[in-house]
Image (spheres, rainbow, N blue to C red):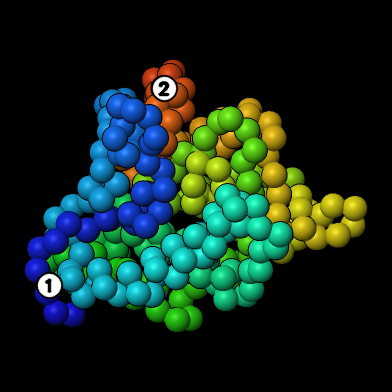
C-alpha cells in the first residue's frame, strides 16, 4: 500500500459515533466527557480529537474505512436515532443494515490493541514493516469481503432503547459483550439512549408471546448501570484507554467502580493476554 500523509486518525472509535455522546452540560461546550482508565481522570475533549493519533493510518486507509465501514454504519445509526427521537411509527431494517453493523464490529476488532499485538507476535513480516503499514494492512485484510467470521455472520441485530434517566457510555473499543438469557450478546452503543445488539441465532430474550421482536426497551436504570460497567471492563481488558459519555455523572459512577476493582480488572487483563 502507498504511504499517506500524516493526519489525525481515530484509532478505533469513529467521530461519526463519538460526536453523538457530546454533552449538553454548560461546562462541556458540546465536548465529550471521558474517563481515562489508566489515571482515573475525568476530562473533556472534542469528539474529533479524542482517541486519535497522528499518522496512525494512512490517508488511503482513512478513506477506505470511511467509505466501506464508518459512513454505512453512521448512516444506519442515524436512521435508528431518527426513529427514536422523532417518534416515527416504523423502523425498517433489512439484511444489508444487519451486515453493516456486523462489518462495523469486525472492523472494530481489527482496530483493537489485541489484534495489533497478535499481528506483531504471529506475523513473520510485521517486524520489518513500519507502524503505519502494519496498522493499515491489519485493518484492510481483516475487513475484506468473506473475512467476516461464521459466528458473527449468524448473529441477529436488535435495537435496544434506553427509557431511563441514565446514559449509555461508549468504550473506545466501540462494542462490548453482555450475558443475557444464557447467551453472549454484543452491544454497540450509538447514543446515550440507544444501542444496537447482535445476538446469536438461538437467543430467546427477544421472544415476546411466542413472536420474535427486534425492538426492545430498558426501563430499569440498574440495567443501564451494569451495562456501563461491562463497557468499562471490556475496554479495560482490551485497550485500557477510555470510555466516553454525555454525562459526567455516569463517569463518576464508573470511576468509583474502577478504583474499587482495579486489582480484579488487572487480573482479567492479564488472563486475556
Quadrant position of the N terminus in the picture: bottom left
Question: How many numbered marks, from 0 up?
Answer: 2
Asked whether residue 51 is in view, the answer is no
Mark 1 or mark 2: whose residue is earlier in sequence: 1
Instruction: Tell me if residue 50 comes above or below residue 213 in the rendering.
Output: above
Foreground pick, 197 / 270: 197
Foreground pick, 91 / 94: 91
Residue found at x 62% / y 75%: 95
Residue 116 position, x and y percent, is 29, 58
Residue 226 position, x and y percent, is 58, 32
Q: Is residue 189 left or right of residue 118?
A: right
Which residue is under mark 1? 4
Instruction: Tell me if residue 112 comes above or below residue 240 in the rendering.
Output: below
Asked whether residue 209 is in view, the answer is yes
Spatial separation of the CA atoms under disc 1 and disc 2: 40 Å
Q: Is residue 138 left or right of residue 83?
A: left
Q: Residues within 10 Å of mark 2 (few under 14, many from 20)?
A: some
Residue found at x 48% / y 81%: 146
Instruction: Tell me if residue 79 comes above or below residue 259 in the rendering.
Output: below
Toward the right, the furthest residue is 209
**Figure quadrant of residue 132:** bottom left
| Mark 1 secondary-structure assignment | loop
Which residue is under mark 2? 252
Foreground pick, 162 / 52: 162
Instruction: Tell me if residue 201 comes above or below residue 86 in the rendering.
Output: below
Residue found at x 30% / y 27%: 27
Q: Which mark is residue 267?
A: none
Amino acid at each position: 500500500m502507498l504511504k499517506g500523509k500524516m493526519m489525525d486518525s481515530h484509532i478505533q472509535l469513529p467521530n461519526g459515533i463519538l460526536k453523538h455522546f457530546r454533552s449538553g452540560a454548560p461546562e462541556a461546550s458540546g465536548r465529550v466527557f471521558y474517563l481515562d482508565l489508566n489515571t482515573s481522570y475525568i476530562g473533556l475533549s472534542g469528539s474529533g480529537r479524542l482517541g486519535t493519533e497522528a499518522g496512525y493510518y494512512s490517508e488511503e486507509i482513512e478513506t477506505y474505512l470511511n467509505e466501506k465501514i464508518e459512513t454505512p454504519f453512521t448512516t444506519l445509526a442515524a436512521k435508528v436515532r431518527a426513529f427514536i427521537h422523532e417518534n416515527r411509527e416504523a423502523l425498517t431494517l433489512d439484511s444489508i443494515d444487519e451486515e453493516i453493523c456486523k462489518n462495523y464490529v469486525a472492523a472494530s476488532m481489527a482496530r483493537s490493541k489485541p489484534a495489533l499485538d497478535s499481528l506483531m507476535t504471529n506475523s513473520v513480516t510485521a517486524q520489518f514493516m513500519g507502524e503505519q503499514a502494519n496498522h493499515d494492512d491489519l485493518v484492510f485484510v481483516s475487513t475484506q469481503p468473506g473475512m467476516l467470521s461464521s459466528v458473527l455472520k449468524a448473529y441477529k441485530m436488535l435495537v435496544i432503547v434506553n427509557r431511563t434517566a441514565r446514559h449509555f457510555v461508549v468504550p473506545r473499543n466501540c462494542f462490548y459483550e453482555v450475558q443475557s438469557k444464557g447467551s453472549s450478546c454484543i452491544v454497540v452503543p450509538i447514543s446515550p439512549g440507544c444501542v444496537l445488539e447482535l445476538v446469536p441465532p438461538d437467543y430467546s430474550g427477544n421472544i415476546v408471546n411466542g413472536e420474535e421482536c427486534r425492538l426492545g426497551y430498558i426501563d430499569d436504570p440498574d440495567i443501564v448501570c451494569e451495562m456501563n460497567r461491562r463497557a468499562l471492563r471490556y475496554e479495560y481488558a482490551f485497550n485500557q484507554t477510555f470510555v466516553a459519555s454525555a454525562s459526567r455523572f455516569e463517569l463518576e459512577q464508573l470511576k468509583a467502580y474502577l478504583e474499587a476493582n482495579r486489582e480484579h480488572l488487572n487480573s482479567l487483563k492479564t488472563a486475556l493476554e
